[in-house]
Amino acid sequence: MNKVVLNAEEAVKDIPDGAVLMLGGFGLCGIPENCISALVAKGVRELTCISNNAGVDDFGIGLMLKQKQVRKMISSYVGENAEFERQLLSGELEVELIPQGTLATRCLAAGYGMPAVFTPAGVGTEVAAGKETRQFNGKEYLLEMAFEADFALVKAWKGDTMGNLVFRETARNFNPLMAMAGKITIAEVEELVPAGELDPDLVHTPGIYVHRIFQGRDYQKRIEQRTVRKK
């Protein structure tokens, strides 16, 4: 199977209106910048986006929110985006806020082929409304369903033509979990190398999970809030 595509535009060309997308990253770290830009240009709408966060007003998923392309956000942190807040309060955007560990575990369950998991996070809160609970060893747990995503969009530092991926430091975050979980996983990488060039011991995501891969360009790698130590 030839997994290499020319660019982000080709990689996302068949993502339809109404698709459910996973987008890797934490804040603006490790986000699939090229794929997001291609989706904005494509104008696809009514998307459900599963992501740790909603980006900021002028970058990341915030670009899609600005164009009214997102119908629903499933996230654990959304505090850096004023447009997100406006759409939420006006009723334009459907939002499901869940604990960060639950977000990660529901991705993991999808990647492992498990339909659901039990977790103590959210028990006794609004998160548990309408959900099944069960006791194990005297402690109550909440049933959470595995995600069902049509596409997972991830960003890696290096990848090879077989789809094997290496993530760099904090940019690993949600990317490996989401790469496992998407029905179709699209990976953009800073450096694309021939198969066999990556050290197998350093591969974080095996190529079996990746369906399309391309070398990205013009990465901004923006930082939400820069904090430096006083001299």
Image (cartoon, rainbow, N blue to C red):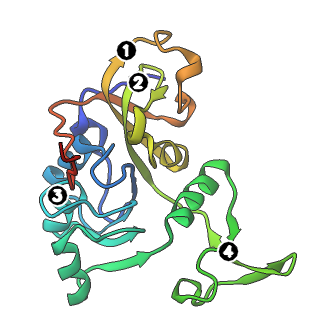
Q: In the rendered structure, which amino acid carries the disc numbered 4?
A: Pro
Report helix, strand or loop for mark 3: loop
Residue type (three-letter) at the residue carrying disc 3: Gly
Relative height, residue 48 to residue 149 (above, below): below
Give above or below for 159 relative to 58.
above
The residue type indicated by label 2 comes to: Gly
Which residue position holds label 1?
193
**Residue at image location 48% in from the left, 15% down from the top:** 198
Residue 84 at x, y percent in the picture: 22, 74
Query: Circles 1 and 2: CB distance less than 8 Å?
Result: yes
| Location of residue 166 in the rendering, given as x and y in whole percent from the top left corner | 45, 28
Question: With respect to residue 155, does 164 lie above or below?
Answer: above
Mark sitting on residue 43: 3
Label whose residue precedes the other's in the sequence (1 or 2): 2
> Mark 4 sits on what residue?
120
Callout in the foreground (1, 4)? 4
Marks 2 & 4, CB-CB < 8 Å contact: no
Q: Which mark is residue 159?
A: 2
Asked if the residues shown at circle 3 and circle 2 are in contact, with their CB atoms under 8 angstroms apart, the answer is no
Distance in Å between CA atoms under marks 4 and 3:
39 Å
